[in-house]
Image (cartoon, grey):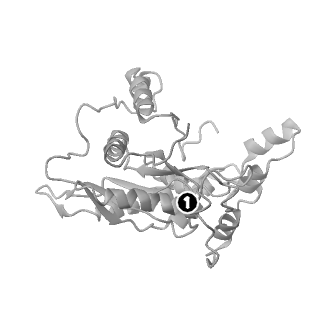
């Protein structure tokens, strides 16, 4: 919706290589789009120096998020995480700390409320004007979304305050990973990037992608994220966890989606997440990781 600034959309480049992502960012920002689009910040692409400061006795500090405590990822996603972590534990310049999900359920409540502050009036009118039937996922995020409501201006302000409050709280969580404080009182040795699932499974069957909080989490926080391929679903290894007891309805829905034979050979990806404006840093971190452990672990061609 034009004028809706509470969740700002961005261009998300897709490439067959990490170099392609770097090239895209360089070319776009080299054009200085902020001279035309006044809402943009005048930040040129800056990869002339390291944003990780490795080689000075410091390590790449990775926050490891296995699960958002709402929907457990499918077995191949957990395996992909384990394989990456196991290999990186043998890299001298890497350090891991556990990243506990901080109120990720609240994050979904806030962003699912901010998606449609007009109660999805614009989307509904467009769909009705088409004369076409509603698709299942449109039904899900609009008609079945308990947070999809028409907001008055005070309601929008209240949600914006919640969003900003949550962002401040998450910043405190990130700062708390510091190993110390420097002479200026600033935290040092904080987590560089978060390593986590890009979703609760490989690409789901059409009309069944009902849980995207592993990415909307970072949309709400305005954190950059970089998704990368790791492996493929292997039915002989990625078996159903028959004894698992789902935590809630969302988790049960995702759990029942998984059939290792239906997902056979489906690509499995993870993501690196950085703080606001750390785009160069997460790319540099993935370059460092790829060079040392040889990602991806499967061929896709």
- Decide if residue 147 is on the left or right side of residue 15: right
- The structure residue drawn at horizontal position 28% and vertical position 59%, both measured from the top left corner, is 90
Relative to 157, residue 48 above or below:
above
Residue projecting furthest to the left = 183
Give the camera-side residue of 27 and 262. Answer: 262
- The structure residue drawn at horizontal position 48% and vertical position 67%, both measured from the top left corner, is 103
Relative to 67, residue 210 above or below:
above
Residue projecting furthest to the front = 236
Camera sees residue 127 = yes
- The structure residue drawn at horizontal position 52% and vertical position 38%, both measured from the top left corner, is 10
- Decide if residue 137 is on the left or right side of residue 98: right
Give the camera-side residue of 79 and 191. Answer: 79
- Residue 162: image location, x then y, percent: 50, 60
Q: Secondary structure at mark 1?
A: helix
- Residue 128: image location, x then y, percent: 85, 41
Which residue bears the numbered disc 1? 76
Image quarter where the N terminus lies is top right
Image quarter where the C terminus lies is top right
Camera sees residue 165 = no
Relative to 57, residue 280 above or below:
above
- The structure residue drawn at horizontal position 22% and vertical position 58%, both measured from the top left corner, is 189
- Residue 251: image location, x then y, percent: 63, 69
- Residue 262: image location, x then y, percent: 70, 56
């Amino acid at each position: 919706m034009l004028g809706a600034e509470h969740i700002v959309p961005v261009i998300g480049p897709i490439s067959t290589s990490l170099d392609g992502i770097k090239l895209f960012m360089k070319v776009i920002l080299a054009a200085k789009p902020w001279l035309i689009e006044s809402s943009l910040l005048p930040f040129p692409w800056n990869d002339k120096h390291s944003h990780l400061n490795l080689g000075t006795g410091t390590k790449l500090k990775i926050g490891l998020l296995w699960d958002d405590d709402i929907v457990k990822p499918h077995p191949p996603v957990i395996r992909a995480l384990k394989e990456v972590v196991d290999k990186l534990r043998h890299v001298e310049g890497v350090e891991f700390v556990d990243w506990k999900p901080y109120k990720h359920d609240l994050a979904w409540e806030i962003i699912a409320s901010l998606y449609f502050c007009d109660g999805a009036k614009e989307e509904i009118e467009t769909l009705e004007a088409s004369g076409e039937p509603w698709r299942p996922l449109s039904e899900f995020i609009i008609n079945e979304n308990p947070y999809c409501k028409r907001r008055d201006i005070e309601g929008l302000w209240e949600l914006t305050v919640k969003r900003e409050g949550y962002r401040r709280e998450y910043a405190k969580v990130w700062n708390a990973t510091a190993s110390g404080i420097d002479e200026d009182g600033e935290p040092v040795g904080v987590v560089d990037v978060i390593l986590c699932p890009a979703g609760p499974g490989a690409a789901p069957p059409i009309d069944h992608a009902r849980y995207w909080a592993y990415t909307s989490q970072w949309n709400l926080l305005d954190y950059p994220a970089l998704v990368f391929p790791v492996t493929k679903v292997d039915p002989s290894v990625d078996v159903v966890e028959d004894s698992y007891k789902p935590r809630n309805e969302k988790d049960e829905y995702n759990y029942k989606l998984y059939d290792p034979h239906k997902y056979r050979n489906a690509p499995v990806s993870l993501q690196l997440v950085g703080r606001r404006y750390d785009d160069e840093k997460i790319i540099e971190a993935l370059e460092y990781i790829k060079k040392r452990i040889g990602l991806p672990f499967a061929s896709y061609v």
